Amino acid sequence: MAEFAAHLTSVADHTRPSLFEVLAQESLAATLRPALTHLLKFVAEKNPGAFGWMYRYGDEIYALLDMILQNHFLAKQSGSFPENFYSMRRVPTTGKQQSLLTRSQHCKSLLFLILIPYIKLKLDKLHARWKEAAPSSDNINRLWKIYIQVYPFIHMSWEGSFLIYQMRYLFHKSNVHSPYLHLAGLRLVYLSPDDLPQSLPQYSRPDLHLLRWQSRLGHGFRRLLGLVAIGLSQGLSVGVFFLQFLEWWYMYGDQQAHITSLPVPSPPANEIQEELKHLLPVDESKCPLCQRVRTNHATLSTSGFVFCYPCIFKYVKNHDCCPISKYPTSLDQVIKLYPPSE
């Protein structure tokens, strides 16, 4: 596999990965989230009633799966999945190198691999949502104004710190390429020939007859988590390039046809309208939400139904779905209409 022994032909003293390899493993990590998001969206659109919640909580599902995967690789191979894929592992920046990470280093690695990126993602989405419309509460409205003005500078400083660390790493001014690794007290090195046997999963089968039932339960649970992590890692190792192709495919499709340049979709088929007839007003000029004559017309690209823009914006913001068809919907899929004046 590509993650083992790809660099062993180089000089033995050259244990420092290049900036290209470091950025490549970060790119691999960034590819997994959109791939899972597209998969959950596809499943949710097939059956919104049963699987719509999976798309709404996609970030939490990804964080849980990522935690299982990264915890396995950090415990067994002293590196995250992308780092191990590119034949790298984590070692302390100072002191003697150890074969495995200490408990403190392990916990710090999970913190900066899972929790901090999750919080940053939620803050980005909150900024994008509040930028579209202010919250209704007065207290939150004051907080909204401060957040909208301050967060871009926080985001710029955040991204700028990563750029500074990468530039210092490129010119050999630092041994770490990321502030995450700096705060964890770790750096990346190549896997050595001595590390390769440790990369193969080895399990000892204890005598279950000598263990109490609590110990048996704990052993079975740990082994189950290990098997899940191994299954995820093997599946990701095989399909990683396919996932990168999917990311390119969706990016290419978005560049070719942006949603705002597409025609307004046609309403659902007649049989679907019959099922949802009780949710629609008899007068087609009225909004299904407020039951009044529509103003500021807007439609949803996911279903084609037309509403008042303030009504549908508030509903999608709070529920993340179409009020009629229950299809998963985001604010980006709310399209304003400009009908000709009568």
Image: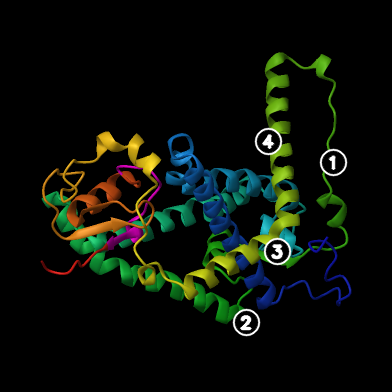
Amino acid carrying label 4: it is Leu
Q: Quadrant of residue 265?
A: bottom left
Q: Are marks 2 and 1 in contact (CB under 8 Å)?
A: no
Distance from disc 4 to disc 1, alpha carbons, whole Å, reads 15 Å
**Residue 249 in the image: x percent, y percent?**
59, 67
Is 311 part of what is drawn in magenta? no
The amino acid at mark 3 is: Phe
- Label 1 amino acid? Gln
| 327 relative to 35, above or below | above
Label 1 residue SS = loop
Which residue is under mark 1? 202
Q: Earlier in the sequence, mark 2 or mark 1?
A: 2
Identified by mark 2, the residue type is Leu
Q: CA–CA distance between discs 2 and 3?
A: 26 Å
Quote the CA–CA distance across marks 4 and 3.
25 Å
Q: Is residue 91 visible?
A: no
Mark in front: 3 vs 1: 3
Residue at 62% x, 85% y: name it. Answer: 171
Residue annotated with mark 2: 170
Instruction: Point out the frontmost of discs 4 and 3.
Output: 3
